[in-house]
Image: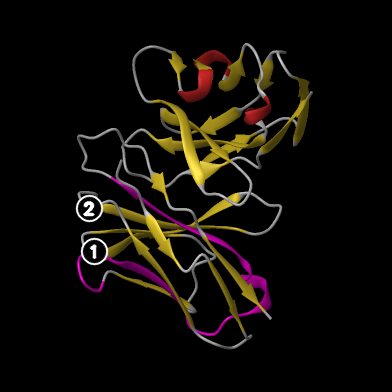
Amino acid sequence: AQSVTQLGSHVSVSEGALVLLRCNYSSSVPPYLFWYVQYPNQGLQLLLKYTTGATLVKGINGFEAEFKKSETSFHLTKPSAHMSDAAEYFCAVSPNFGNEKLTFGTGTRLTIIP
Amino acid sequence: EPEVTQTPSHQVTQMGQEVILRCVPISNHLYFYWYRQILGQKVEFLVSFYNNEISEKSEIFDDQFSVERPDGSNFTLKIRSTKLEDSAMYFCASSGPRTGTFEAFFGQGTRLTVV
């Protein structure tokens, strides 16, 4: 069984400030981990993923995340927030078999303060 | 860039009516999924489909739901008799061959409103 916990349903940061969105997972098998972004009235777009190899993964739009097995975490960061980053962010986990269902967290709504 | 396409973008239906939500997955993908997102809640898995059969389904996916790949390109979700609580955004997703990147590509969603 797998689950994802996203701490903070709403996060507000000032433009130019560090973005940190937290994700912790529980998995009975080695996981694949994903971050998806959902802009208003749009679908889910993959930001980045961890499958194997390097634990620090870089994604689109300047985002990155680090897989920390000892902490069962996969936090999403961006050094400098832009107004265009305002969206809902979902962390998701799947078993490491490939092409398995995703289990999503409850999402974090990111607001950027001008 | 290839994408998953869903139609319609928004559907309003009366309670008790049947609805069919349509999806065109990415052409070389072999695995297909439906998820739903009730307003303000998280995205939930409904069903996965591979090799022309359901590979896994959630407890949400009861006898009112069915999926089909009628013609090798479309992938449909049918809700036989809609209830108010079926109102949600429904997302179709597909993922590729086993040696691929294992990431699921999502469509833009169909917002279903049951009145």
Residue that mark 2 sits on: B27
Quarter assignment of residue A51: top left
Query: Which residues make up the magenta segment?
Result: B70-95
Q: Is residue A1 visible?
A: no
Q: Mark 1 falls on what kind of element?
A: loop
x and y percent of residue A93 in the render?
48, 36
Residue picked out by circle 1: B73
Q: Which x, y percent locates residue B96?
A: 25, 44
Give residue B2's position: percent from left, percent from top.
Answer: 30, 45
Residue drawn 46% across the image and 22% down it: A59
What kind of residue is marked 2? Ser
Label 2 residue SS:
loop
Proximity of marks 2 and 1: CB atoms separated by less than 8 Å? yes
Quarter location, residue B11: bottom right
Does any portion of residue B42 appear in the rendered image? yes
Kind of residue at badge 1: Ser
Is residue B75 shown left or right of residue B81? left
Per the image, is A65 magenta?
no
Neighbor class of circle 2 (other Cα within 10 Å; few <14, some 14-19, many 20+) is: some
Instruction: Using the image as rendered, state which of residue A56 and residue A47 is in the foreground.
Output: A47
Name the side, left or right, on which B36 lies relative to B113: left
Query: Would you place residue A61 above or below residue B13 in this image?
Result: above
The chain that hosts pointer 1 is: B
Q: Position of residue B84 (x, y in %)?
A: 68, 77
